[in-house]
Structures are given as structure tokens and as C-alpha cells.
Amino acid sequence: MAAMADTHGPGAASQRPYDIVLFGATGFVGELTARYLAAHAPEGLRWALAGRNSGKLAELRGRLAKAYPERPGLAELPLLHADSGDPESLRRMAAGARAVATTVGPYIRYGTPLVAACAEAGTDYLDLCGEPEFVDLMYLRHHERARESGARLVHACGFDSVPHDLGARFTVERLPEGVPLRVDGYLRTDARFSGGTFASALTAFSRFDRMARTARERRAAEPAPAGRRVRTPVGTVRRERELGGWAVPLPTIDPQVVGRSAAALERYGPEFTYRHHALVRRLPVAVGGLAGAGAAFALAQHPATRRMLSARLAPGEGPDEERRARSWFTVRFVGEGGGRRVVTEVSGGDPGYGETAKILAEAALSLTCDELPATAGQVTPAVAMGEALTGRLVRAGIGFRVLEE
Ligand SMILES: NC(=O)c1ccc[n+]([C@@H]2O[C@H](COP(=O)([O-])OP(=O)(O)OC[C@H]3O[C@@H](n4cnc5c(N)ncnc54)[C@H](OP(=O)(O)O)[C@@H]3O)[C@@H](O)[C@H]2O)c1
């Protein structure tokens, strides 16, 4: 049985009935995460499934027990009823757990009361949020309270943004200390979206003005790192001969997360620059991708056209098992500084779902089982779990390799 150290916050948290509660367990990624925990949770881990629909939770528990008959206790896995619209149910769930991992999104629509409940109860919180507005809003509203209570609020614990955040850190650790550093990340993947992800992206597009306003409020409120500078500029479309393709700027939440890790950790040097890109083989693909994203952005601005787009892929739907099994990703990092250059790569299977579920589950296990640095408040995956989570992901089959040093 794995040792379970209570490494932060009030010791009382270790007396709670559950180490990990998985909220939204009945959704597409929720079920994949439940399956991962069912197959890999260390013996003795006290975990539970939570959601708004007790019947669906019981059916899921039955599927888990049937799929993993060799794993003890799955048929008796506790089921907790909790609904995003019922803050009391969220307070009960947060107070009974050391960590809550949630897949209930879009987070800007459903997520706030759970973050509030975890910040208040000193409960670690993890999500799959790729929505910058939500992350900034939770910083403004709940970071201070979580620092006081000892709760670690860790957003973006899926493909957004763990491979990028830990990969940038892995690269920085191979560059000289105390000098300006620059890292470029290049993502390649052939994956498809689920309905839940599509709904979250459309919601984010439709709230662009509010997202920009909240980001400004956060910049005004958040202290800058003393005596250091962190930049995450948006790059331009350009040919990358050495990488064999075209780099297209990728304005996801990932560069923001990497930048926050750099601001928190001195190891990233006195001046750190990160640029984030997609890498595509042919220019027409780059142009098509930009045009498609632009069209979705424009259509998301009006309720009628947004509804039309939403209907194309409903929440709960996603790529089938065969399609997921064929999917893959690589993120290549090129880091430079102090006269050195390193090239590294993080790689894995289906980024959106299989690997996202694996990453969320391993992050929850890391927060509850590993010896970690003392942190509290809103923290990035690299700051909260850095090396420990990288080690877990490597053991779980996600590659972290140095290609050139
Ligand atoms: N970071 C990443 O890389 C990444 C990758 C994939 C997905 N995501 C994000 O993860 C989230 C989930 O995606 P998905 O595809 O799994 O979505 P999904 O299949 O639609 O699942 C959503 C889950 O939320 C639950 N839910 C909805 N409203 C609720 C409420 N009021 N109270 C309690 N539970 C509620 C649903 O419960 P019912 O079953 O009862 O309907 C379901 O369990 C999305 O926000 C998506 O953007 C992120």
C-alpha cells in the first residue's frame, strides 16, 4: 500500500472520510478517470464517485466492478450526490474529502461554487479547465482564502496544460541557472474533441470581452515576481525547417500556465520567455486551422449561431474507443539560454481523453499520496506537483525525453 502523507494544511484533512472524490464521474472524461482510478489506485486509497444523478452513478459503479473484477471493493465504492446548483451539497462533499477532482464543465458556468467550497474547507481542488476567464476569476475570488485554509487550487490538470507546463519545466531544468531563458513549445496531434470540450470552447469564445476584462483585473491585483521578468508573447506563423513544418501561434491557456509557473519558481531565471505553437506539416493546414477557429469564434458571438454549432456535438458525446486508441500527441520544446540549447519532447496517446483522464487521476493521486513542496492557494501543476507528477506520468507511459543537449 502506498504511503499517504498529509503534507499541507490543517492535519484534520487527513481524518476526512475520502482521500479523493471524483465529481462529474458520469461524464465522458469523468468515466475514463474513474476507470483509471479503478485500475490504478493504490490499495487502501479511500475514494468516491460524485455526481448529480444517483442512478447514473450506480450504473457506472456496476461497470467498474465488472471491468476490473480483480480490484477489491469497487462494487461498494461510495457514491455521493452533489449538484453544482446546490452549494450545500458541494460544501458537504468538500468537507468530506482531502481532494476533489472535477470534470463538471464548462467551468465558468458550473465551477465557481465548488472552488469556493474547497477554498473554505482547506480541500485540494483539481479540474480540467482550459478557460482563462474562470482561472483568473477564481484567483481574484478564492486565492487568498485558499492560502489561509491550506487548499491547493490546481486548474488545468488535463492535456490542458500539464504536458506543456511540466515539459517547459523539464526543459528549463536542463538549461543554465541565473541567466535569461527562452523556450518555444510546438504541439502536434491528430486528436478530436468531445461534446464537453466543444461546449467549453464555444462558451469561452462567446465571452471574449469578459475574459479580457477579468485578465486585466488579475494583472492589476497579482504581484509581479520581484526582480524577475516573465513574458509569453504570441508568435507569428513561420516556417520551422528544422522541425519540418509550420509553426502557428496557439493562444490556449497553456502559455499562461507556463508563465505562472515561471513567475513562481526562481529556477526559470531572471528573464523567461515562452511562446506556444501548433506545428503543422503544410501551410494550407495552418491557414485552414486559423480560418476554422476564426469562423467558430465569429459564430459563437450570437446565440442562434452558437446553438447551431453546439448541436453538432452534444455534451456526453466524444470520439469512440477505436479512434481514441489511434490518437497521439507530441510537444517539442526548444530551449535556449546562457549559450546552451536543449530540445526535449513530451509525447503520449489520445490527448483529449485517454491521457487527460490519466493525467487528472495521477495529479489527484500525487496531491494525496506524494511528498510535495508546501504550497497553498491557486497554484499551477508544475509548482504544486512538478517532479513528483512528471515521475508518475513517465511510469504511466507518457514520454519525457531529451532529444538534443
Ligand atoms: N483540459 C483538457 O485537456 C480537457 C480535455 C477534455 C475535456 N476537458 C473539459 O472537461 C470537461 C468535461 O468534459 P466531458 O467531455 O467529460 O463533458 P461531459 O461528457 O458533458 O460531462 C460533464 C459532466 O458534468 C456533469 N454535470 C453537468 N452539470 C452538472 C451539475 N449541474 N451538477 C453536477 N454535475 C453536472 C455531467 O453529469 P450528468 O452525467 O449527470 O449529465 C457529467 O458528469 C469540459 O469542461 C471539457 O472542456 C478538458
Image: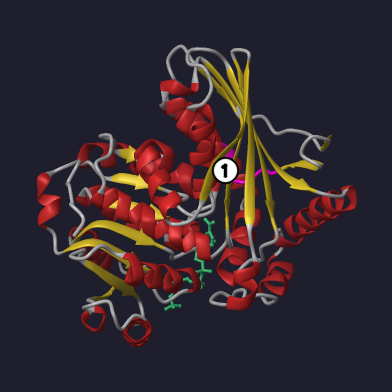
Q: Is residue 260 above or below residue 104?
A: above
Q: Does the magenta stretch include residue 376?
A: no
Q: How many labels does the image show?
A: 1
Task: Locate residue 7, reporting x and y percent.
Answer: 19, 42
Q: Pointer 1: residues within 10 angstroms few (<14), some, or many (20+)?
A: many
Q: Mark 1 points at which residue?
A: 254
Residue 291's quadrant in the figure?
bottom right
Along the viewing direction, whichever of 169 and 114 lies nearer the viewer = 169
Residue 337's quadrant in the figure?
top right
Q: Is residue 379 visible?
A: no
Which residue is painted at 48% across and 40% down in the image?
Answer: 166
Q: Is residue 27 left or right of residue 114?
A: right
- Which color mode does the image show? secondary structure
What kind of secondary structure does the magenta stretch mostly adopt? loop
Q: In this view, does 125 lie to the left or right of 316?
A: left
Amino acid at the residue labelled 1: Asp
Task: Locate residue 78, reporting x and y percent.
Answer: 22, 76
Along the viewing direction, whichever of 291 and 373 lies nearer the viewer = 373
Task: Locate residue 183, reporting x and y percent.
Answer: 62, 29
Task: Locate residue 3, reporting x and y percent.
Answer: 18, 52
- Magenta span: 250-255
Q: Does the magenta stretch include residue 252?
A: yes
Q: In this view, does 275 lie above or below 273?
A: below
